Amino acid sequence: MQKRVLIVDDEVSVCDVISRLLERDGVEVVQAYSAAEAIQLLDQERLDCVITDVRMPGGSGIDVLDHARANLPTLPVIILTAQASLQAAVDAVNKGAYYFLRKPFSGDEVRGVVAAAIEMHRTRQENRHLRHELRKAIPQRQIIGKSSSMQEVLKIADKVAGSDCTVLISGESGTGKELFARYIHRNSRRGDRPFVSINCGALPETLLESELFGHMKGAFTGAHRNNDGLFRVAHEGTLFLDEIGEMSPGIQVKLLRALQEREVMPVGGTRPVAIEVRVLAATNRDLEEDVRRGKFRADLYYRLNVVPLRVPPLRERPDDIPLLVEHFLRKACDAEGVPCKRFDAEAARLLKQHDWPGNVRELENIVERAVILVDAREILADALPAAVVRGRGAPSVEELMEGNPTLEALEKRYITKVLDESNWRKKRASQILGIDASTLYRKIQRYHLTKGGERNLALLAPSHT
């Protein structure tokens, strides 16, 4: 395929000189004499590289660069600069330009840089095609649901996938918020670029800052080399910030600046680094309430909540439960290498009427457990957990409020009840409670909860620790 390069300079002589140099290597050259003309050609022509002057009347090379980065992210842009505009060229490289050439330049330098840029562009294009084919070959986790509430959420997800807007995905723990984030990414123009996720509640503040924004060698004890940080790892792709409501105030300030300025400051760094990434965030908290209580920055909330997307809990869409059960049965049976099993009518009825405090994640775990533990092709109701058989996964309000307990004793009763219902499987209990496993462990230690009589004694009086 013919190599094609766009040269942009208001000086016709410069365009002609570079054209003659590149034509020696069999490159087809297109010339433009203003930023506006170049932007129009970018939208119309198939190109392998752009060479643009920084300073031109009626626009600049930075305008050309910005348009290329937004619409043709793999297209390399080389900046031409005189000494007077050297800083602008350096800034352009920080914004994503491939290289800058200082005037006067040598012919060999121009030919070498352009040849490398074209090779990189074509390699990127081939990689994008291969990743696209690979994504088609590898099955993706599906979003399953025919209910009107799920169809409405999918409709919103389809609309926002085509843009670069920030989306705040809210919903209870286990509803599939990350699944929707991946769906939006996969159906966006960034679908063949990285999808990077991080749980903001799982790391302490200092480590989270380094993970997000990167750090310089020697910035702190143990920083033996530079670290790019996830904003830069996700370059041209999507960064998913899960449990954004758990982020500390200090990190909230830095995140807000990154979203506003499209640049990050690595820990220990002295110069900001430009980023080009889409941000999706998720929370199981009521962030509006956290804003009112001063626990979450209002300006960051409005920056994140450009498009709100609420994933409904499973109890609000019972018609989807049979579909999900069938899907998880096939998945679990395939993983175990056994013929497909099914639930009998009574078990199916109990599954549909359960309120699913752990949502889709809890349902998947129960189906998977049944497939592993039951040898028969038909899974009976007695194979289901006691909480499902009884029709509830958490204590009733009446049970909790018996004896007019204090708020602290109420929390202990609730946690204890869920631990009992899950047979003290702490990971499952944390999912049902909608909290991190680490938070559950701290609660167990605080209330001195144990499996047995010592725990019951702890319920009799509030803890003073």
Image (spheres, helix red, strand yellow):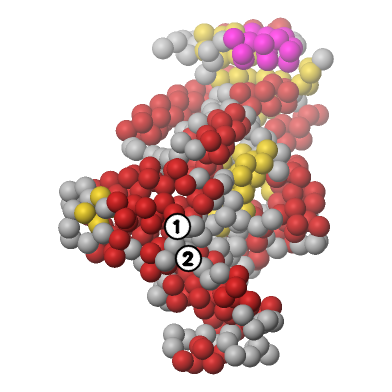
Q: Is residue 161 visible?
A: no
Q: Which residue is mark 1?
A: 354
Three-letter code, disc 1: His
Instruction: Write down the region rendered in magenta.
Output: 31-44
Q: Nearer the viewer, residue 33 or 284?
A: 284
Q: How many marks?
A: 2
Which residue corresponds to mark 2? 393
Magenta stretch, overall SS:
helix
Residue in view at x 26 percent, y 59 percent: 380
Amino acid type for the residue under numbered disc 2: Gly
Residue at the (51%, 88%) spot, across then down: 455
Circle 1 SS class: loop
Position of the N terminus, as image quadrant, is top left
Estimate the spatial distance between the alpha carbons at disc 1 and disc 2, rounded to whole Å.
8 Å
The tag earlier along the polypeptide, 1 or 2, is 1
**What residue sits 55% from the left and 39% below the top?**
149
- Sort mark 2 into few (<14), some (14-19) or many (20+) by Cα contacts within 10 Å: many
**Residue at 43%, 40% in the rendered image:** 144
Seen in the picture, residue 120 relative to 213 is either above or below; the reply is above
**Looking at the figure, which quarter contains the C terminus?**
bottom right
384 is higher (above) or lower (below) than 25:
below
- On the picture, is 101 further left or further right than 26? right
**SS for tag 2?**
loop
